[in-house]
Image (cartoon, rainbow, N blue to C red):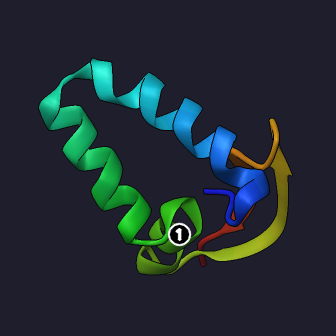
Amino acid sequence: MPEGRRGLSGRLITHAVERPAGREHYAHFRAFLAGGGLLGLAARAGATVLREKRAVFRLMTLAVLDRA
């Protein structure tokens, strides 16, 4: 998630989209963020990030991973 004052609107929009998906989904979304998001998930899976790009006002991370 984007940080600081500039990222506030992005965080609000993201939570506004994720929350209506349901209580269970939103709880998993928050756990995903707490675990480091995509890059945290990749690290726990033993994958190496080969390339990373932030998109859509830094709300989305696109990554190329290698898992040997």
Q: Position of residue 52 (x, y in %)?
A: 82, 63
Name the image quarter holding residue 59.
Answer: top right
Q: Where is residue 2 in the image (x, y as percent from the top left)?
A: 68, 58
Q: Residue at x 67, y 39 (%)?
A: 9
How many numbered marks are there? 1
- Depth check: give the residue in front, 22 or 43: 22
On screen, residue 7 versus residue 15, left or right, reads: right
Q: What residue type is labelled 1?
A: Ala
Q: Is residue 9 visible?
A: yes
On screen, residue 21 versus residue 12, left or right, reads: left
Which residue is disc 1 drawn over?
Answer: 42
Q: Which residue is drawn at 79% across and 54% down?
A: 6
Name the image quarter holding residue 41.
Answer: bottom left
- Depth check: give the residue in front, 9 or 51: 9
**Outermost residue, left side:** 24
Does 61 appear above or below 43?
Answer: above
**Outermost residue, front side:** 5
Q: Which residue is drawn at 57% across and 45% down?
A: 11
- Depth check: give the residue in front, 54 or 52: 54
On screen, residue 37 versus residue 50, left or right, reads: left
Quadrant containing the C terminus in the rendered view: bottom right
Does 35 appear above or below 61?
Answer: below
Quadrant containing the N terminus in the rendered view: bottom right
Q: Position of residue 20 (x, y in %)?
A: 30, 19
Dot 1: few (<14), some (14–19), or many (≥20) neighbours within 10 Å?
some
Q: Which residue is drawn at 59% across and 72% down?
A: 67
Q: Is residue 62 visible?
A: no
SS label for mark 1: helix
Q: Position of residue 17 (x, y in %)?
A: 46, 23
